[in-house]
Image (spheres, rainbow, N blue to C red):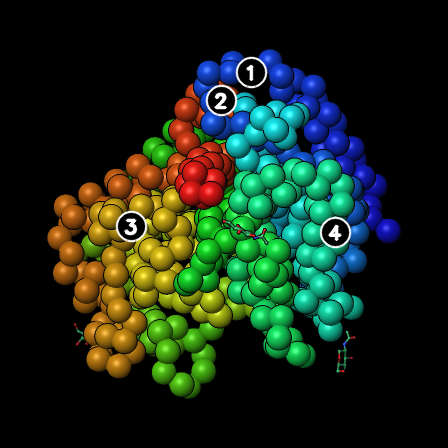
Amino acid sequence: MASKSTFFFLTIFLFFINLTVSQQISTVDSECTNRWIHIRTLPSRFNLDLLSTCNHYPITDDLCPYLANHGLGPKTHTHTRSWYRTDPLLLELIFHRRILEYPCLTPDPNLATAIFLPYYAGIDSLRYLYGPDLNSSSDHGSDLLHFLTNDSPEIWSRRSGHDHFLIMARPAWDFSQPLTVDPPIWGTSFLERREFFNLTALTLESRFWSWQEQAVPYPTSFHPHSLPFFESWIRRVRRSRRSSLMLFAGGGGTSSSPNIRRSIRLECTTTNSNVTKSENAKICDFVDCSNGICEHDPIRFMKPMLQSSFCLQPPGDTPTRKATFDGMIAGCIPVFFEDQTAKMQYQWHLPESEYSEFSVMIPKEDVVFRGVKIADVLMSIPKEEVVRMREKVIEIMHRVMYRRHGASLGLMSKKDAVDIAIDGVLNKIKSRVDDL
Ligand SMILES: *[C@@H]1O[C@H](CO)[C@@H](O)[C@H](O)[C@H]1NC(C)=O
Ligand SMILES: *[C@@H]1O[C@H](CO)[C@@H](O)[C@H](O)[C@H]1NC(C)=O
Ligand SMILES: *[C@@H]1O[C@H](CO)[C@@H](O)[C@H](O)[C@H]1NC(C)=O
C-alpha cells in the first residue's frame, strides 16, 4: 500500500490538472502563434497509477518520499525555500507539473503545434529493467501505442507522430534494446519500435546517433521560486571562497585496470597531502559517493562544490553525469574528459560554441596513458581566466536549473531548463513538419 501522504500528493496534483485545464483558454493568442501545445489525456495507468505504487518498484529506494512537492522531493531542511532531495527519475513528474503552467495550452489538438504525452515512461520502465517484466522488455510501449492508434487515432496519425513528444527521465540507452536481441541484454525497446521513430523523447542522455531523443539536464536539488531567492544564491556562489583547486564527487575508480576515474582517484589521494603554501589551499578535494550515499543528500557535495574552482566530470557507467549540473549550480567550472559527457548531449541548453568559455576539456587518454596531471593543466590557467569562466558558469546557470512550479514572474523572465526544452521541441517539430 502506498502511504496516506502519497495519496495526498496525488490529490493535489489532480487538482492542479483541473485548475489549469479550466484556465487555459484565457491566454493572449498572439504570443502563442506556432507555440500551442495540447496535453493528451491519457488513462491513469500511464501516469498517476504509476505513482500510487511508488513503493512497489524493484529498486533499492522507495520512490514515495520523493513524490513530494510535485516530484521535487522533500525539502532538504525545514526552513529552506529552494533546496529539495530531488530524484532525477521524477523529472517526468516535475516536467508534467511545469507544462501545466505553460501559457499556450490548448484543449483542441487540431490547433496545437505539439502534442505532449504525459506518460511516466521511465517509472513504467522499472518493471522491465529490474522487475517481473524483464523477459518481455520489448513490449514497453505496446500499451501506449495501442491507445494512440485506437483512441482518437487521427491525433496520432495527423502528422505521422512527428508532433508528439514525451519525457523519459533516464539515459536513452535504457530504451534502445534492438528488438532482435533475444534474450535482451539491457533495456527496453521503446525507442527501437518503428512506430515511435517520429516522436521526440526528452531523455537524460542521448545516443550518439540520436534521431528521436534530445538530452535535457539532470535535475539538481536547487529549485528556487522567486528572483530574490535565485539572486541571493548567485551572490553566495560569487562570494564563496574557493579553497581547493579541484574536486571530484563520485564513486568508482577502485579497479586496477586503467581508466579515468582511477587516474583521478590516484591523483587526488596523492596530491591531497600537498598543500600550496601561498593560499593554504587544497589541490584536490575528493567526496566519496560510493554506494549511492550522495543520492538525495545534496549537502554532502554542494558545500565542497562551492569551495572548489573546478569540478571533475569523468564518464562512468554512461558518459554523462548529474554532478555536471550540481557543480554548475555551485559555480564550479566543469572539467570534461570526453565530448560525450556534455558537448554532444545538451546542445539546446549548453550551446556547443560556448564550451571553451565555461569549461575545460582534458582528453582522458592524455591523463590515463600519457601521464598528464589534471592539477598541472588547471594550475596553468591564468587567474583572470578562471574568474571569467566562473562568471560564464553563473551567467548560464539558469539554463540548467529547474525552477519550482508556481514561480514568480520575475524568475520566469529567466529561461530555465523546461522553458528551453519546450522551445527546442517546438523548433524541432516545426522543422520536421515543414519537411513533410
Ligand atoms: C527470465 O528468463 C530467464 C531465462 O529463461 C529466467 O531464468 C528468469 O527467471 C526470467 N526472469 C523473470 C523475471 O521472469
Ligand atoms: C514517419 O514519418 C515519415 C514521414 O516523415 C512517414 O513516411 C512514416 O510513415 C512515419 N512513420 C510512422 C511509423 O508513422
Ligand atoms: C608534492 O610536493 C612536493 C614538493 O613540492 C613535490 O616534490 C611532489 O612532486 C608533490 N607531489 C605531487 C603528487 O604532486
Residue that numbered label 3 is attached to: 352
Q: CA distance from mark 3 to mark 1?
A: 34 Å
Q: Earlier in the sequence, mark 2 or mark 1?
A: 1
Query: Disc 4 or disc 3, which is closer to the eye?
Result: 4
Question: For residue 254, what is the image quadrant?
Answer: bottom left
Answer whether labels 3 and 2 touch (C-beta < 8 Å): no
Q: CA distance from mark 4 to mark 1?
A: 33 Å
Answer whether labels 2 and 1 touch (C-beta < 8 Å): yes
Picture disc at residue 146: 4
Residue 334 location, x and y as percent? 32, 54
Q: Earlier in the sequence, mark 4 or mark 3?
A: 4
Query: Disc 3 or disc 1, which is closer to the eye?
Result: 1
Quarter for ligand 3? Answer: bottom left
Residue that numbered label 2 is attached to: 32
Q: CA distance from mark 2 to mark 1?
A: 8 Å
Residue at 29% in and 50% down = 352
Residue at 39% in and 50% down = 346
